[in-house]
Amino acid sequence: MIILGLNVPGSARSRPIILAFAGLLVISLSASPGGADEPYARTRDYDLQHSKIALRFDLEDKKVFGDVVHSVSILKDGTAKLAFDSVGLTIQSVVVNKAAAKFESTADKLIVPLPAPAKVGEKFDVQIRYEGKPTKGLYFILPDKEYPDRPKQIWTQGESEDTRYYLPTYDYPNDRLTTETILTVPASWITVGNGKLVSVNDAGNDMKTWTWKESVPSSTYLITVVAGEFDEAKESWRAIPVTYYAPKDAVTASPSTTAAHRR
C-alpha cells in the first residue's frame, strides 16, 4: 500500500483547496463522454499480457542490448498497427508471429503495422531487437576518477514513464502484464529482478545468465533490473526468508544486527 499525503497548514486553508479539487473533479467527469478514460488514462488498442525481456550491457559505453518478445491481445476491431513507447533506442529488427515485419521509428514511438486489420481478441507475439544508451530509466554506476573503487552497478527506475528509455514497450500505468527477465552479466555479479529467480546459467566468456519470472501482473514502470557487484546475506524473520543486498564490501554490520534494530 502506498499512502500519499498533502500537508497544507491550517484547516481554514485546507477547506478551499479540497473544495476546489472536488469541483475540478466533477467538471472533469462530466466532460468525459460515454465513460471514456482520457485525458486521465490512455485509450488502449491492445492489452500487453506478457513480456520476455533479454538484456545485455556494454559497461564502458553505457549501452543496453535488448531482445524482447511482447505478447499482446487486440482490444479494438480494425486495429492495423501496434505502437510501443520508445525513446532514444535504435530498433534493429521486428518480427510479428515469427514473420519479419516492417516498422517505423519516431522520436517517441515504435510503430509496427500488422499484416491485416485485427479483430478483438486476436493475439500477436512481437519480437523487437534493439540497442541504446539510456538517458533515463536505466542507470550505470561505475568507478570514476573521484571514486576509483566504486562497485559497478546497473539499476532501473521506470516510474512513472521512464521504462521506454531502455525498453520499447507500452509505458503507461493503466495496463498490467507478467514478465520474464533474462539478464546476462559478468559471472561475479549478482542480479535482482521481478518475481522468482528460476535459473542461473553459465553463458561463456566469464558471463552468467540469470532468469527471473514474475507471475503477478503489474505495470511496466515496475519492471526492475538490478545487477552489479553486491554482497548477499540471508536470514529469516518469522519463518519468512529475507535476503539482503549491499554494494560489495560496504556492509559493516551483520544482517541480524540490522534486522534487530528495525524491530
Image (cartoon, grey):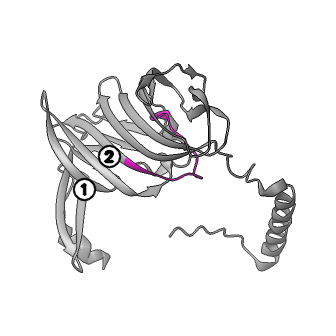
Q: Earlier along the polypeptide chain: callout 1 or callout 2? A: 2
Q: Is residue 172 magenta?
A: yes
What secondary structure is found at the residue carrying circle 1?
strand
Quadrant assignment, res 170? top right
The residue range painted magenta reads: 165-179
Q: Quadrant of the C terminus?
A: bottom left
Check residue 226 in the rendering and tell me which mark sits there, or answer none.
2
Which residue is found at the position 18% from the left and 52% from the top? 231
Mark 1 → mark 2, Cα distance in angstroms: 10 Å
Q: Is residue 164 magenta?
A: no
Would you place residue 108 above or below residue 53 in this image? above
Which residue is found at the position 83% from the left and 58% from the top? 28
Is mark 1 in CB contact (under 8 Å) with mark 2?
yes
Amino acid type of the residue tagged 1 in the rendering? Tyr
Q: Nearer the viewer, residue 44 or 143?
A: 44
Q: Relative to 60, is 206 on the left or the right?
A: left
x and y percent of residue 200 in the render? 17, 45
Q: According to the image, label 1 marks what residue?
A: 245
x and y percent of residue 180 in the render? 34, 46
Would you place residue 167 above or below residue 219 in this image? above
Q: Relative to 17, is 194 on the left or the right?
A: left
Which residue is found at the position 55% from the left and 41% from the top? 122
Would you place residue 155 above or below residue 108 in this image? below
Quadrant assignment, res 30? bottom right
Check residue 155 in the rendering and tell me which mark sits there, or answer none.
none
